[in-house]
Structure formats: C-alpha cells, structure tokens
C-alpha cells in the first residue's frame, strides 16, 4: 500500500528526506497550511535566531542584446533594434559608485547573450570595478552567460571561470535555470543551454571554490512533476559538493512576452516556496521574491520557509520589462521584516552579517513596509 500524503507530511515534519514521489504527493495534495507549517519548522531548525536577512545590491544589465531570444523574456532585443544597448564602462562605474555611496555591497551584473562580448570585455570590466571599488562583491554572470562567453572566446568553461575569477568575479548567480527539465526548456527557451550544461557550469564553479546560488522560474509551461524534478536536481547537485548558498524561486511574469499566459497566484507561489524549503534542507537559505510578488506576499512567505528577502535592488530592468515593477528601499525592507515579527539584519553576498538592526520585531506601529508600492501581488494572494 502506498503511503498517503499525511504519512509523507509526517516524515517531512520529522526531518526525514522525501522521495520524488513523496514530494509530489504533498505538493499536490497537502493543505497549503500544512505545507507552510512543515516548511516553517525546517526554517526554524536551520535558523533558530528568528532573523531575516537582506542585502543592499544593484542589478546592472550591461546589455539587452541577446541571441537566445527566450519566449518568456520581455527584456531582450536583437542587435539591430533601435533600443538595443551595451553600457559603457563609464556608465557601469557610475552605477557602481552610486551603489557604494548607499552602503551597498553586492553588484549583480547580468545581460543578454551578446554575440560580440567575449571574455576580454568582462575581464577588463571586472578589473576596472575592483580597482575602483575593491569592497564591492561581484556576483555576476549566469551559467548561460558563462557558457556563451566560453563558446565565443574559444575557451573551456573551466578556463573561462578561472580567468574571470582572476579579474574579480567573486560568485555566480543561478539565473537562467528556469525549470531544469529539458522538455520545458525547449518550449520556453529553445536556444538556451540545457539543464546539464547549467549544472556543469555550477559544478565547475563549486570545484573552483566559488559560491553560487540556484533559482527557479515557474508558472510558465511546466507540470508539478517538473517543479519537483527541478528541486531534486538542485538538491543532488548540492549533495555532490555544490556551493549553493541560497535558493530563489520566482514566478514567470507574462506581460509583453511571446509566451504569454497567466501569472501564478499567490497561493501557488507560497506552495512552491514551502516545498522548496522542505526538499532543499541541504541549502541554508531560501529567498522570498518581493520583486515579483510584492512586499506583503513576501512577508507571508517568511512563514512558508523563506528566511531572506534578497536585495534592495537599486535598479531592476528584466522583470520590469514584463510589466511587474515593485520597489523597496532599505528602510522599507527593515520595516517589512520587523512588521512580520522577525529581527532584521543586513548581510553580504555569502550570508555574513553586516549589521543587525536593533529594534525588536513588530515594535514599530508606523512600519513603512510597502509604502509607495503598488502591491498587486498581495491583492492577488488575498483573492486566491
């Protein structure tokens, strides 16, 4: 007799690893509140200090030219498009200077797969950033970008990472993962690397001692089985010796895209966050995506397994191109964390604590959480 969802839930609550079948059963059949309770228990076991972290960062998109032309992306442009661009070194340095002046520590630099930007471009750029701002952590270039740079530079992935590290690249973000199932990837991003190439870049980064993160974009054309497979592939990569410091799930935004469709609901988002926290108990941190969900739903996600709110993002262009534009400064971030009942702390890229904010959780009745934010994601969560 096959175990029922309640039996799988009890195993998860006891900290026992689930099988793919067990994870799928509780994902599909367990009550949302049950998933949330189990995920919250995992979070509290891994982070008993009742602290939620954030990082002050800037997302600089150095180009919007991309040969991949993913069907879910509203940001990319062809090389000959009138609004195609490549930022100059001076423009990028100005943006990093603004980040530094605001106490930022992390530079997230990503762009399209430009056919002309080989490894020398990035070596020169990273050296320039480090010469001017040695304290800024360069957390940049997705596995797809690394693979593309190595291909057009006649270099192996290992050599490409070695050269970029010497130039100043500190860690690798997990962008471009989408769903790590090639059937889905062929539908939403047919010209992008497959899941095994994504994994190969991450394995090599870990071998070279580089911290990495893993992501998942869901709500497009995947099945529940694909979400579960994605999580287990990330878990297995970590178990093999991976260097994932965090997992960041976020929802596909259909506005202005070729793929179209309907955005995932708030309840669907929370279900995935909770399952991710339960399955990925070998990855320390799970990030709530206020960028796609808004401040209020991100607060709820803190009780569904998330322990981090990601970056303040002085700049964000890719998700905004799909018509989803939330903004949150440091004061709002701290207010959101406190209002949700947690201690707030600023961290660096690798989750070292930079500053703990002293006021007690929930002590400020005039919280600025969400002030000035059009919180449509919160409305969506309440409707569903």
Image (cartoon, rainbow, N blue to C red):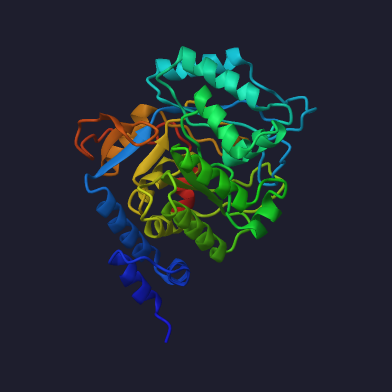
Q: Is residue 144 left or right of residue 102?
A: right
Instruction: Spot the residue most to the bottom.
Output: 1
Q: Residue at x 40, y 63 (%)?
A: 32
Left of 373 or right of it: where is 198?
A: right
**Quarter of the image where one finds residue 342:** top left
- Write the residue at 41% across / 60% down: 279
178 vs 222: above or below: above
Q: Quadrant of residue 164?
A: top right
Q: Is residue 177 visible?
A: no
Quadrant into which the N terminus falls:
bottom left
Of residues 130 and 316, the one nearer the viewer is 130
**Observer-nearest residue: 120 or 103?**
120
- Please report the residue visible at 41 percent of the width from the left and 40 percent of the height from the top: 295
Q: Is residue 309 visible?
A: yes
Q: Is residue 50 left or right of residue 6?
A: left
Q: Total of numbered circles in the picture?
A: 0
Q: Position of residue 35 (x, y in %)?
A: 37, 63
Which picture quadrant has residue 64? top right
Q: Is residue 126 above or below residue 199?
A: above
x and y percentages locating residue 163 in the rendered image: 56, 28
Task: Identify the residue shown where x is 22% and y is 39%.
Answer: 361
| Residue 172 pos. (x, y %) | 50, 36
């Amino acid at each position: 007799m096959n175990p029922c969802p309640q039996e799988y839930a009890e195993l998860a609550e006891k900290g026992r690893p689930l099988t793919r079948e067990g994870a799928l059963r509780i994902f599909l059949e367990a009550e949302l509140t049950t998933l949330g309770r189990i995920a919250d228990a995992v979070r509290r076991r891994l982070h008993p200090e009742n602290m939620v972290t954030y990082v002050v960062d800037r997302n600089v998109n150095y180009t919007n030219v991309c040969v991949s032309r993913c069907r879910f992306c509203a940001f990319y442009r062809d090389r000959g498009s009138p609004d195609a661009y490549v930022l100059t070194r001076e423009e990028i340095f100005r943006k990093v200077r603004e980040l530094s002046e605001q106490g930022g520590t992390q530079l997230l630099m990503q762009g399209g797969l430009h056919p002309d930007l080989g490894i020398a471009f990035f070596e020169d750029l990273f050296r320039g950033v480090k010469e001017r701002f040695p304290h800024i952590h360069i957390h940049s270039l997705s596995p797809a970008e690394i693979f593309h740079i190595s291909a057009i530079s006649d270099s192996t992935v290992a050599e490409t990472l070695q050269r970029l590290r010497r130039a100043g690249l500190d860690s690798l973000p997990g962008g471009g993962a989408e769903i790590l199932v090639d059937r889905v990837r062929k539908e939403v991003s047919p010209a992008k690397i497959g899941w095994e190439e994504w994994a190969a870049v991450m394995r090599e980064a870990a071998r070279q001692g580089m911290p990495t993160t893993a992501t998942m974009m869901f709500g497009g054309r995947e099945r529940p089985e694909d979400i579960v497979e994605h999580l287990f592939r990330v878990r297995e990569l970590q178990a093999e010796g991976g260097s994932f410091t965090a997992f960041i799930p976020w929802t596909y935004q259909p506005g202005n895209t070729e793929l179209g469709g309907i955005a995932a609901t708030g309840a669907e988002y929370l279900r995935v966050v909770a399952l991710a926290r339960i399955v990925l108990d070998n990855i320390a941190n799970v990030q709530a995506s206020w960028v796609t969900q808004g401040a209020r739903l991100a607060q709820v996600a803190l009780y569904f397994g998330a322990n981090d709110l990601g970056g303040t993002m002085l700049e964000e262009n890719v998700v905004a191109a799909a018509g989803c534009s939330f903004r949150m400064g440091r004061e709002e971030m701290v207010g959101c964390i406190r209002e949700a009942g947690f201690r707030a702390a600023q961290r660096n890229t690798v989750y070292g604590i930079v500053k703990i904010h002293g006021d007690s959780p929930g002590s400020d009745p005039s919280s600025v959480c969400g002030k000035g934010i059009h919180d449509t994601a919160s409305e969506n969560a309440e409707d569903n």
